[in-house]
Image (spheres, rainbow, N blue to C red):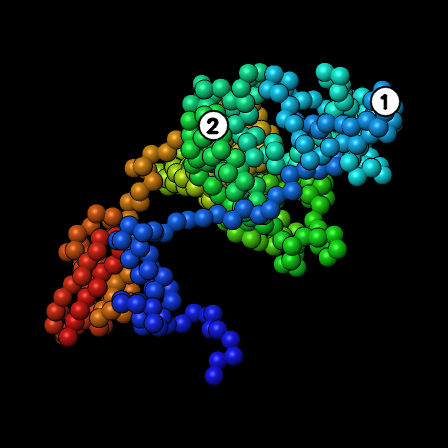
Amino acid sequence: DLEEAFSGQGVAVNSGEGLDGLATADMHQAVLQKLEEAGAGGAQVTYKLRDWVFSRQRYWGEPIPIYFPVEMEDTSGDPRNGDAHEILFDQPIPVADEDLPLRLPEMDRFEPGDDPQGCLARAVDWRYFEKDGKWFARETNTMPQWAGSCWYYMRFADPKNKDFAIGPKADEAWLPVDLYVGGQEHAVLHLLYARFWHMVLHELGYTQHPEPFQKLVHQGMILGSDGEKMSKSRGNVVNPDDIVRDYGADALRLYEMFMGPLEATKPWQTSQVTGVVRFRDRVYALCKRFAEAREGGEEEAAMDRDTERAMHKCIKKVTEDVDALSFNTAISAMMVLSNTLASLKPAEAPVPKEALKNLVLLLAPFAPHVAEECWQLLGAESGTTLTYEAWPQFSEELCKDDTVTMAVQVNGKVRGTIDLAVDADEAAALEAAYAQEKVTKFTEGKEIKKVIYRPGKILNIVAK
């Protein structure tokens, strides 16, 4: 005998034709389908907004444009003087449109005090006012930060407009927001409320766009070195000022972006900052090497084909990774190019200026301070900045390799590798493969049943 009703996931029974025997999730879908076919209902997405306490007992914040009638014990009394009175909070009155915006009073003291109504309750000349021979009291609570943060992006697009929160031209030109980057802790509260507010403003005709953001990316949280959320109580908080003091602001920026994918949650490891410091210093040393060679009267170095290809591949990689917000792999690509340039022989020779110039321009958004220093070393006019320089361009042709290394399989097992031209045909691939003893060892004296060749990828020989 059952002691209580079964409320878990299971199998439907006594539920009607076509439903009995279905698992709970499948039964839900079947019910929805039946309702839709019968025109009696259907699926609908609903959002659960948490209960929202939309008031704060503090000074900063938008004043709430509501006031209340005041009943005086003595009709000749004045509530501003502390005369006995009662505020009728059950009879709220909205401030008329022509009296908006309601502005906060000037005050010298902002501490809460003993009055639960907040510090604005002490501004009696602002709180109480007389109208048509009757006294009224303003609401002394202010709005929370949500009131501004839920639509601030609209005001940013038209900050000096005195007639509208955002004018039609600015709305057309700037909204919706192309990319919104917010933390994981923003996902439910701020961003859901912002979308809620935007939809209300859209329905009221203040914006032509039904959605506020075209793309939303949640950046991962940076944890303490112990893998836990940074907290004073845990003693694992990393002070950015300490990192800037010890390694510089550029190193801090580079390491934050190099730690891993933007969306990933990752632990901070101060000991690993030295890796990006070496990269930063290497780029500066290369530019200094160029500057010293130029001052010594040496001719500018020509760029060989391999270096040129490495440069264009780096430009392509960084450009595409920045668009994809893959900053860690963009920095990795610049590290590879800096290593390539540092390995050029002879070591004391000047590095090709074009390669250095493009590397510095790519580095600038990530490490602006050292990039500006390097730009000056490369011969920029005194007082100029790289800020207004064009982003480097790459050649698709130069990003392609002339040759490719491919695996050679015999009966599905890798037996060797071959280097081929990218456009090499099957005959050339087989000739290179049969030139290797490791391959012929498994094919000699056997019948070649089939050859599977995918240019640039793999060569598979089936032999029996």
427 displayed left or right of 157: left
Describe residue 3's horizontal placement relative to residue 316 as left or right.
right
Mark 1 residue crowding within 10 angstroms, few (<14) / some (14–19) / many (20+):
some
Q: Is residue 155 visible?
A: yes
Q: Nearer the viewer, residue 235 or 94?
A: 94
Q: Position of residue 39 (x, y in %)?
A: 28, 50
Q: Nearer the viewer, mark 1 or mark 2?
A: 1
- Amino acid type of the residue tagged 1 in the rendering: Gly
Residue at 29% across, 37% down: 397
- Residue 326, x across and y down, in percent: 47, 44
In what element is the residue under mark 1?
loop
The amino acid type found where label 2 is placed reads Leu
First in residue order: circle 1 vs circle 2: 1
User: What is the C-alpha distance between the residues marked 1 and 2?
Assistant: 43 Å
Residue ID for mark 2: 204
- For label 1, the residue is 77
Frontmost residue, 366 versus 296 = 366
Would residue 392 be seen by someone viewing this image from the given angle? no
Residue 264 is labelled as none
Residue at (11, 72) in percent of width and height: 447
Picture coordinates of residue 171, whole percent (x, y): 46, 23
- Label 1–label 2 contact, CB within 8 A: no
